[in-house]
Image (cartoon, grey):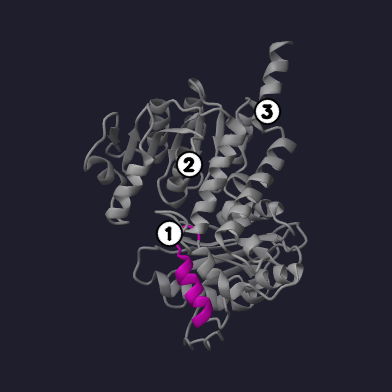
Amino acid sequence: MTAAAPRRLSRCGRSEGEHVVSTTQFAKVFHWRDDLTEAEGWLVIDSLIGGVSGGGLFMHPRVTLSEVADLAATMTLKNTLQRPRFGGGKGGIRFDPASPEAEGVLRRFMIAHRDVIAREWSTGADLYTSREVIERIAREDLALPTAFTAMAATLARHAGIPSQAPAMPQRLSRTWNDHATVDDAATGHSVAESIRLSAGGRPRVAIQGFGSVGSNTADSLTSRGIGLVTGICEKDGYLVDHDGIDVAELLRRRAEGTDRAAFGELVRQDPQRGWKWVPRGAGQSDEDLLTEFVAVTGPEVLTPCATRYAVTDSVMREFVRDFGQVVVCGANNAFSTHEVKAHWIRQGVTIVPEWVSNSGAAILFAELLKTERADRETIQAIFATVTERIEEFLVAHGLHVDNRKRTQADAAHQ
């Protein structure tokens, strides 16, 4: 299918060129201001490998250049798991995603960076953005077959096949199970596999967030018997069941209701035996809510899958007080600072890097661009590849459960 000609917009904002802000060879920053609203944004290419980079495009009212650059660097790390490797980049727009003008702002940002998207940066949905909207803008306004044209061309050349870009929107949005598309299921698979390979046994897991990443992680953990989900924390409060939450029931309720329903509404409509719902306190901060949640659930594994920079020193102190051993992140950049993360690693907590644990969708994406087949058998083989690459990393860096057991045994004999 031929891409539509781009629509003419009289004003789409301006991108103030590129400014090198890093000592890395390829780092680029594009600063953008919208002409029609107060929106402001940044596109950071942290690295170019093979001429391309990849990473999502997000929007929220408090975006900063520092946040975008931090996440772009994380994408560089995440893309080291790819074969072949490619670089990392990220786009962030400071604007309210709930505004009726949000889609127009997103469109103008993408138009302003059309040449970069076409040649160097492949992008997709991220925090408060939609894959469907980004893809539609790429086709209708940028005259590109997809927002990941650059990467598709590179990987097709590597595989010796025609570009798979035109087929990718349908491939990624394909239904995988009763509640998830292929790409959402891939992320849940990688987080759950990271828990299985780093924690072992059937650990008690507390999950922050029940959006796409959190719910698919919970489903993968419980449906495959990897872990016991004993707590789920959301914006309006948290749910606890020390015998294990019936995740399938929560997913069924959400499917029958509305995506905008608060998590507490799903729980309160018919509380199951053993469920304990604790609403958020008036004026309670995010940090206090998460700290209280960890104290009440007493998990062996903490899995933050919601907001960035949520895991603070206070949260970690409560986590290790009883049973806490392993942190496996579904959210990017989940720790409040690098120093907090480094401190608790020194204290002996196993922390799986988020660019490893939530790599499932990124690996799926790249592998699908290298094949002309996308049937269920092919996708299952890609899921196995995700597991292999995670395990390879964990073993190499001493984070695999078998490594940890040997280390603990050695310490006990000293």
Q: In which quadrant will I find the N terminus?
A: bottom right
Where is residue 325 shown, x and y percent of the image? 56, 26
Q: Which mark's residue is nearer the viewer, 3 or 1?
A: 3
Decide if residue 329 is in sight here: no
Report x, y in % for residue 99: 35, 66
Q: Earlier in the sequence, mark 3 or mark 1?
A: 1
Q: Which one is closest to the eye, mark 2 or mark 1?
A: 2
Give the class, few, some or many, for how many residues have Cα within 10 Å of label 3's Cα (few <14, many ≥20): some
> Which image quarter holds the C terminus?
top right
Q: Quadrant of residue 102?
A: bottom left
Against 317, residue 382 (above or below) is below
Write the start and end of the magenta stretch as one range: 126-140
Quickly name the residue at label 2.
310
- Find numbered disc 2 in the image and state the secondary structure of the residue it sits on: loop
Residue underneath mark 3: 402
Q: Amino acid at mark 1?
A: Pro
Q: Residues within 10 Å of mark 1 (few under 14, many from 20)?
A: few
Residue at the (45%, 60%) spot, across then down: 175
Q: Which amino acid does the dot numbered 2 rest on?
A: Ala
Q: Which residue is mark 1?
A: 61
Asked if residue 133 is among those painted magenta in the image, a careful observer would answer: yes
Query: How much space separates mark 3 and mark 2, taking CA atoms?
Result: 29 Å
Q: Is residue 245 above or below residue 408?
A: below
Could you tell me how far apart the alpha carbons at marks 3 and 1 are, in whole angstroms?
Answer: 43 Å
Give the class, few, some or many, for how many residues have Cα within 10 Å of label 2's Cα (few <14, many ≥20): many
Mark 1: secondary structure: loop
